[in-house]
Amino acid sequence: MEEGDFYLSEEGYKVFTKQYHLKRGYCCESGCRHCPYGYDKKTNSKR
C-alpha cells in the first residue's frame, strides 16, 4: 500500500480511499465508504 491508499478512522480502523479501490480494480461488495463502483450493501446491487 502507498500513501493515500487509506486513513485511520477515529475508532482506529483503516478506511480505504477511492484511489486504493481503483488501483485494486474491482468491487469487493463489502459496502466500503469510498467505493467508486457504486455498490450498495443495503440492496446488494451496483449503480
Image: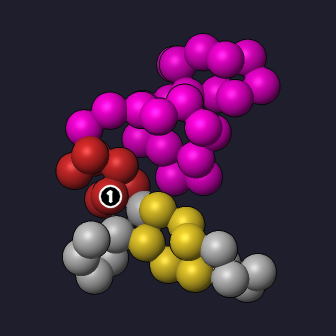
Q: Position of residue 8 (x, y in %)?
A: 58, 81
Picture residue at 60% right of the left edge, 52% below the top:
33
Q: Position of residue 38 (x, y in %)?
A: 50, 30
Q: Position of residue 39 (x, y in %)?
A: 55, 28
The quarter holding residue 45 reads top right
Task: State the count of labels.
Answer: 1
Q: Does residue 3 appear to the left or right of 36 in the view shown?
A: left
Most common secondary structure along the magenta stretch: loop
Picture residue at 68% right of the left edge, 83% below the top:
12
Would you place residue 37 above or below residue 23 in this image?
Answer: above
Placement of the N terminus among the 4 image quadrants: bottom left
Q: Secondary structure at mark 1?
A: helix
Q: Which residues are magenta?
A: 25-47
Would you place residue 23 above or below residue 2 in this image?
Answer: above
Q: Position of residue 46 (x, y in %)?
A: 52, 19
Picture residue at 56% right of the left edge, 72% below the top:
14
Picture residue at 22% right of the left edge, 50% below the top:
23
Q: Does residue 14 appear to the left or right of 16 in the view shown?
A: right
Camera-nearest residue between 11 and 42 = 11
Would you place residue 30 above or below residue 18 in this image?
Answer: above
The colouring scheme, among rainbow, by chain, secondary structure or one colour, is secondary structure
Q: Mark 1 = which residue?
A: 20
Amino acid type, residue under disc 1 in the picture: Tyr
Q: Does residue 17 appear to the left or right of 39 in the view shown?
A: left
Q: Residues within 10 Å of mark 1 (few under 14, many from 20)?
A: some
